[in-house]
Image: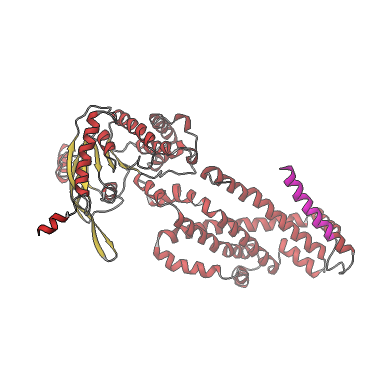
Amino acid sequence: MALLRRQLAEEREDTGALLELRDVAKEFLARRQRTKAIDHISMLVQNGEFVCIVGPSGCGKSTLLNIVAGLEHPSAGRVLFDGRPIVRPGAERVVVFQEPALYPWLNVRANVEMGLKIAGRNGADRKRLAERYIELVNLKRFSKAYMHELSGGMRQRVQLARALAVEPRMLLMDEPFAALDAQTRDVLQQELQEIWARTGATVLFVTHNVREAAILGDRVFVMAPAPGRLKREIGVDLPRPRSPDSHAVVDLAARIRAELEHDIYAVPSPEDSYAI
Amino acid sequence: MPFRVLRVVLFYLALLGLWQVVAMLHVWPKYVLPPPNEVWDSFWTYLRSGRITDAVEISMRRLLIGYFIGLVAGVLIGMAMANWKWVDETLGSAVLGLQSLPSVTWVPLAVIWFGINDKAIIFVVVMGSVASIAISARSGMQQMPPIYKRAALTMGASRLQTARYVQLPALLPSMTQGLKLGWSFAWRSLMAAELIVATVSLGQLLDLGRSLNDMSLVLAVMLVIVAIGLFVDFLVFGRIERFVQERWGLAT
């Protein structure tokens, strides 16, 4: 048994990381032209970490997340989850989407149970787990409600509960709060911090909101566009829970923003062209 | 609400009154336009002799079996057409062709294949309803938000699970009209087949009325068919529509 495990470990080229991206690139074929959406992406995500990827829209951060989800395949490079290549989507890497990807014909509880139903869990298990996670996202009163009766923020909570209910090893969040109003977003960011602390989930969180990245991340990767690359990694060592208005968070957000802006304004200035 | 009911009742009473008056003017002979009371008498006579109830029972049984087979096959074919391009290009073109074929044209073939019996008629009903249901299922799949499938996939769903738990129920709102269309095509096919394949049935009662020059019977059977149609529309499709409005929260 021990021998087998050692062999497996060798085959899996263990880095100890839960997620390992090695020189990942993705090309799209658009109008007969190959366009690189992302290029040379390498990163490690450890168990229990909260990693944010922040970048302007169109920088390929959602593509990156989709590759980790297994919904898209990289054109080059390796993507290893727990040492094994990712070939298809799986319940160990559940996605929380920006749009409320919920099922209108099911009520809140049935929606949260969906992943468990797919996993073939029995009715009693499904009910118990669904109720636990519905309570965790503070929707207990609404477990019989249908999707059109819920606000945008509540729908995202349902999505979060549904993702957590299958107890994934990694939660992939694709700008989950981007379509919400500012107040709701603030509340959900605070709640997500609490939930993360209580569940110990590993999270890969994609956003274009620098403040959000500063509040949530243990580490923040700044992405630069065309093609999407990881430009800078910023370790965040601030105590939690972090308030959006604390000086430290505001300073950090400013730092991330400076990194982003540097890139956006990196067009050659007139002086530069005269100098040539 | 009471006013709306009253309005409907008044409309039909007026229609009935107009019919009675025209019939009593004897513009046309009675075998061309019998008055409503004779239609009612005819209905009552055939109902008491049990011939209408027998016919309704047999016809409805054929219709339900045929429609059910057409529904299951149509939804499966439509989903397959939306899922695999090669199915759409091969079977899909056949389905389109089938839809342009009036279902009554299947009757001679069905009689030769199955004989003068239930099977032949059920076959015609299936062939009449399956194409419109398949086409409606395919377009429903294409209109479905792709995020439904992606969400299921990231929760680890297989293709079969995605189809069963997600795509099938998600088809309901876009398919409500298609289901109704399939039902009315099934009815048409049934009547066409029953008029030709003479076994005890509503269609056969119609044909009997024609051959006896008994216009009252013909009209009575037609009214029975209309009544069944309205009843099913209200009971089944009305319920589906209300369910969709309730769950999806579409404006009523």
Q: Where is residue A194 in the image (x, y as percent from the top left)?
A: 32, 28
- At a point 16% along the width and 37% down the height, the residue shown is A2
**Residue closest to the eye, B48 or A241:** A241
- At a point 75% along the width and 58% down the height, the residue shown is B223
**Residue closest to the eye, B107 or A30:** A30
Indicate left or right for B186 with A163 as reference: right
Q: Position of residue B30 (x, y in %)?
A: 87, 66
Residue B40 falls in image quadrant: bottom right
Q: In this view, does B2 lie above or below B225?
A: above
Quadrant of the drawing holding the N terminus of chain A: top left
Residue B115 falls in image quadrant: bottom right
Indicate left or right for A226 with A154 as reference: left
Q: Position of residue A218 (x, y in %)?
A: 22, 34
**Residue closest to the eye, A19 or A150:** A150
- The question of residue B2 being in magenta is answered with yes
- Most distant residue in the right direction: B25
Q: Position of residue B210 (x, y in %)?
A: 78, 68
Quadrant of the drawing holding the C terminus of chain A: bottom left
Is residue B200 something one can see in this rendering?
no
**How many badges with numbers are in the image?**
0
* Magenta portion: prevailing SS class: helix
- At a point 44% along the width and 33% down the height, the residue shown is A127
Per the rendered image, the range of residues in magenta is B1-19
Is residue B92 something one can see in this rendering?
yes
**Residue closest to the eye, A147 or B54:** A147
- The question of residue A146 being in magenta is answered with no
- Most distant residue in the left direction: A276
* Image coloring type: secondary structure
Q: In this view, does A141 lie above or below B111?
A: above
